[in-house]
Image (tube, rainbow, N blue to C red):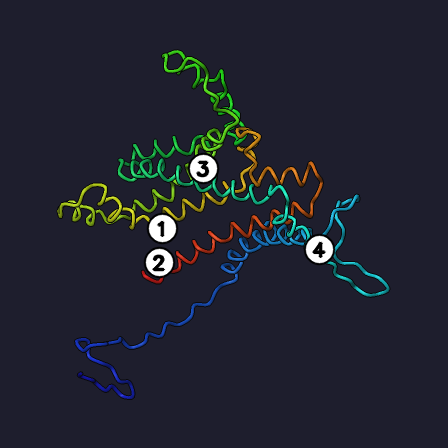
Amino acid sequence: MAVVNVGSYTMKRPGSKGHRPPPRFVPEKKISWRERAIIFVPYLWMILFFLIPFLIIFKISFSITEISIPPYSPIITFEDGAMQIILHLENYTNIFTDPDGTYLRSYLKSIHVAAFSTFLCLIIGYPIAWALATSKSATRNILFILIIMPSWTSFVVRIYAWMTILKRDGLINDILMTIGVIDHPIYMLQTDFAVYVGIVYCYLPYMVLPLFSALMKVDYSLIEAAQDLGCKPVKTFFNALVPQTKSGIIAGAMLVFIPAIGEYVIPELLGGKDSILIGRILWQEFFNNRDWPLASAVAITMLTIMAIPIIWFFKNQRKQGAQV
């Protein structure tokens, strides 16, 4: 192995095995006060509107219900000059020891609905994102407007529109009965089907946009090479295209799954009585039962469940960044 001595630094020739270039010393750039102010703004926003409310809910979850204003007991009291901290854990134990299993079933139901809705958004959104990525610039702008335009209307108004479409004497049943496909109206409203329709309709743009961004960075020479080697279209799609858009798939899935798991408006308006998702449970405990401590414990548990895919997403992003 050839070695060249340069002063006190020993360097291997580029052609030799295990060559490492000499270390580069990059001077650290000083951050100006303007840059610090710009960085501070999002941190301040997260502290005011996420961290502080989270800590308040977390504190309430260790209280017990009382007939007072606010309707829960304080966890910090002062008696004879001594401070006492009383933490009640029964709110968390009630979630897992409930005789009817209402909370656990609502968690599992919410995860199931959110996961299946995310899968539907992926199946529907991938071809739309592909059409956007492969279309001309003028056509692409029109398609973008068509995708984003429903978001300009109120969320609740859009859900009420679907109620009129899916009801027994709604648009879908009228069309199917007019052309003779069915003889009697189909019961679609107040079902899980209606909940899936509402979630997919409202959250589909959050899946399409990350997929479009990933598809714009695809190396199409790999797809052409796979086709030249006789790879079938389905195999080419899963082996050459999907791996290149993995980051877009994960980002879109997180943007759909996380808000869908705590959705309240769509299950409340489109779902039936059996569609007891965790968002409806939170509403009932907070406003109907006035049990703020238990509702806070349910919310904290839900946030813990939601943190699992978020942590996995960030770990995946770091792994991809390290590979690059």
Q: Earlier in the sequence, mark 3 or mark 2?
A: 3
Residue 127 drawn at (x, y percent): 31, 36
- Mark-to-mark CA distance, 1 and 2: 9 Å
Q: Earlier in the sequence, mark 1 or mark 4?
A: 4
Q: Is residue 194 left or right of residue 53?
A: left
Q: Are marks 4 and 2 in contact (CB under 8 Å)?
A: no
Q: The residue under label 1 is which amino acid type?
A: Ser
Q: Earlier in the sequence, mark 1 or mark 3?
A: 3
* Amino acid type, mark 2: Gln
Between 217 and 91, the residue placed more toward the observer is 91
Q: Position of residue 14 (x, y in %)?
A: 19, 76
Mark 4 and mark 2 lie on one chain; the one further toward the N terminus is 4
> Which residue is identified by label 3?
203
User: According to the image, label 2 marks what residue?
Assistant: 320
Residue beneath label 4, please? 88
Q: Earlier in the sequence, mark 1 or mark 2?
A: 1
Mark 4 vs mark 3: in front: 4
Q: Position of residue 289 (x, y in %)?
A: 70, 38
CA–CA distance in space, label 4 to label 3: 38 Å
Q: Quadrant of the C terminus?
A: bottom left
Disc with the residue nearer the chain's start (4 vs 3): 4
Residue position marked by numbered label 1 in the rendering: 247
